[in-house]
Image: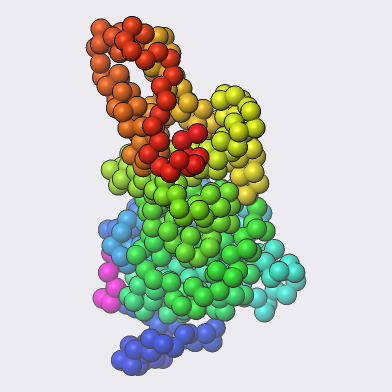
Amino acid sequence: MRGIIIINFVKKIFNFSNQIPDKHSEPTLYPRAEHCISRSQISENALKVLYRLNKAGFDAYLVGGCVRDLLLGREPKDFDVATNASPEEVKATFRNCRLIGRRFRLAHVHFGREIIEVATFRGSEEKESDDQQTDTEGRLLRDNVFGTLEEDVWRRDFTVNALYYNIKDYSVVDYAGGMQDHQAGLIRLIGDPLTRYREDPVRMLRAVRFAVKLGFTLHEDTAKPIGVNASLLASIPPARLFDETLKLFLSGYGVQTFEMLRHYDLFAMLFPDTDQALADEEHEFPRMFLIRALQNSDNRLAEDKSVTPYFLFAALLWEPFTQEVVRLKEEGQNDSVAYQNAANTVLSRQVKVTSIPKRITQSLREVWLLQSRFESRKGARPYRLLAHPRFRAAYDFLLLRADAGGADPSLAEWWTSFQNASEAEQKQMTSSGNARRGKRRTKRHSAPRSASNP
Ligand code: ATP
Ligand code: MG
């Protein structure tokens, strides 16, 4: 320990910021006085788990996103614990514990709605030529050997995600140089970036997600391989990409995330049809619309309001949908058939990339199909639309379209007034007596051939 502290002292004095620690480096220890993590910021349940493991004779650390977020003074989403106790030993220590996972067994300790995830340290590659296997592209297939904290470090993705808070003395243990990167605001992959992306291409998406969420920069070695290797994401199961997509776009920084994903050619791997639709830079609307929709979600999340995945996907896929509607109408299909068929085509293509649960595609489809019904403002139709369970979402969607120049603003205004009007006013607004009857053509604000307003 004394040796480590001396090395630590020397490292700190000379600030070896360019030196990347390797597997044989000594850890740097940051005692309690040298970092800002206080127990008052840690969930009581996480503390209970850490202390109980310690008392039972095991090492117990907070690790990953919670340490990273605590160092920024932010409230972590959840608390993850790493220990040298085996999953069975963890289970034996807690009554409220369940073991989960096949590839790598984890213990979940339940406290009402809060779950503290306890993972046994994972072992090093050298030790497990049989147990840790990669496929022909270098992707990790199995990853299930237990090890020590020192070995566990090198399995994690980014240096700032590999900091361990030791409950024994409240110090932070840093093998990978995460503390310096944290202070410098850098997202840096541990180890050789290309190898790490090949092992798990989702790390490219995670790099973007953390950079945006934390306001950090991607280290150039971590950023460089992304563009040319984005296509590796094609091998990731659609269910995992769906989960990642939600994390990317529903974390409150959707606009920046979108821009950064596009910058690194990653957006095309998640929404190929949308990306293609955006390629036509002559038409401003598609990009404007997406930015407004994402900004709208970000604002709602900042106000602690809910954001639904179906609304998000409806916006993200709107442009390919409307382009398909236009194409089908040109082929002679009538409005409602074209809308149905376009929805089928776009969704069946998208679910091959990011699977979308049925309940989400159903609601999303309703939001799309209701857009055409806003045009009818006479007789009983507006009342029927108003009573539709998906009216509110569809109306919000219409406002976004109008705001971005893809629908007639007076149509949106009409619906705003209609909802707030008295019974008598509503009757007057919908009576066919005055001027226009039936469908009113929407004025196009975007370029004439834009599909945004099919
Ligand atoms: P947040 O929960 O705020 O999104 P996080 O860093 O906690 O961020 P998780 O997905 O909860 O992210 O993962 C917890 C930790 O597990 C990470 O901090 C990282 O150390 C490790 N980890 C997760 N996914 C990977 C991966 N694909 N490759 C390597 N390590 C990973
Ligand atoms: Mg986490």
- Is 304 covered by the magenta stretch? no
Residue 4 percent location from the top left of the image: 41, 87
25 or 293: which is nearer to us?
Answer: 293
Residue drawn 45% across the image and 40% down it: 448
79 or 297: which is nearer to us?
Answer: 297
Determine whether 428 is above or below 176 in the image. Answer: above
Residue 159 percent location from the top left of the image: 45, 74
Residue drawn 51% across the image and 75% down it: 224
Q: Which region of the structure is painted magenta?
A: 33-39
What's the coloring here? rainbow
- Is 38 covered by the magenta stretch? yes
Determine whether 409 is above or below 42 in the image. Answer: above
Question: In the rendered view, does 11 fall on the left or right side of 320?
Answer: left
Residue 204 percent location from the top left of the image: 53, 65
49 or 435: which is nearer to us?
Answer: 435
Residue 120 position by quadrant: bottom right
**Numbered marks: total:** 0
Residue drawn 38% across the image and 66% down it: 68
Determine whether 442 is above or below 248 in the image. Answer: above
Residue 385 percent location from the top left of the image: 43, 18
The image quadrant where one finds the N terminus is bottom left
187 or 93: which is nearer to us?
Answer: 187
Q: Is residue 358 visible?
A: no
Residue drawn 35% across the image and 72% down it: 185
Q: Is residue 217 visible?
A: yes
